[in-house]
Image (cartoon, rainbow, N blue to C red):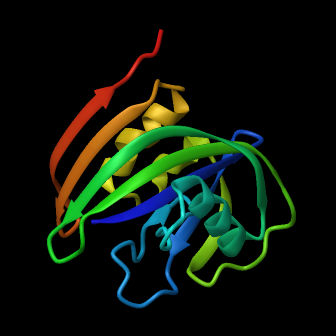
Amino acid sequence: MKISTLCYLEKDGRYLMLLRNKKKQDVNEGKWIGVGGKTENGESPEECLCREVKEETGLILNDFKLRGILTFSSKGWEDEVIFVYTSDDFEGIIRECSEGELRWIRKEDIWDLNLWEGDRIFLELLMKDSPLFSLKLSYEGDTLTEKKLKLYSFS
């Protein structure tokens, strides 16, 4: 099982979204997602997050917040645990991404994009500022076949 990160950068009521349309053999081909990627050996999720955001966008994260953990499985692809973050504290100039097209999308317009069905679940949690979540998503092709959500509260 691989470990990955996913970050939704926020600015002026928008998320920075990535249309995955440049990479071959991409489970996310044609989908809009946040930025991020797989951990490298010896790398923590936070180190991976900062590296991947810089590689994909050119931006440097000053701060970020862990929002949830996804367990993603899809027939024909390796299972994945994905640490989901948001950040509104970053600097730099966005550059072209080798994996797809980056675009700032108004949060209310996100729902019109070609998203994974499960992404709609956790994006709603992010937008509602829900507590830390764990969400298991299983797919066959583009069809969501299983979802299990757990919200955590720390008081």
- Residue furthest to the right in view is 92
Image quadrant assignment for residue 35: bottom right
Image quarter hosting the N terminus: bottom left
The image quarter in which residue 143 lies: bottom left
Residue 17 visible in this rendered orientation of the protein: no
Expressed as whole percent of the image width and height from the top left, the position of residue 53 reads: 66, 64
Image location (x, y in percent) of residue 74:
20, 66
- The residue furthest top is 155
Q: Is residue 131 left or right of residue 86?
A: left
Q: Relative to residue 61, is residue 11 depicted above or below?
A: above
Q: Is residue 8 visible?
A: yes
Query: Percent from the top left, x then y, of residue 71?
Result: 28, 51
**Residue in front for this viewpoint, 109 or 4:** 4
What residue is rendered at 38% in x and 33% in y? 133
All told, the count of numbered labels is 0
- State which quadrant residue 60 falls in: bottom right
State whether residue 69 is above or below residue 95.
Answer: above
State the residue at coordinates (20%, 38%).
148
Which residue is painted at 18% across and 60% down in the image? 139
Residue placed furthest toward the front = 42
* Nearer to me, 151 or 141: 151
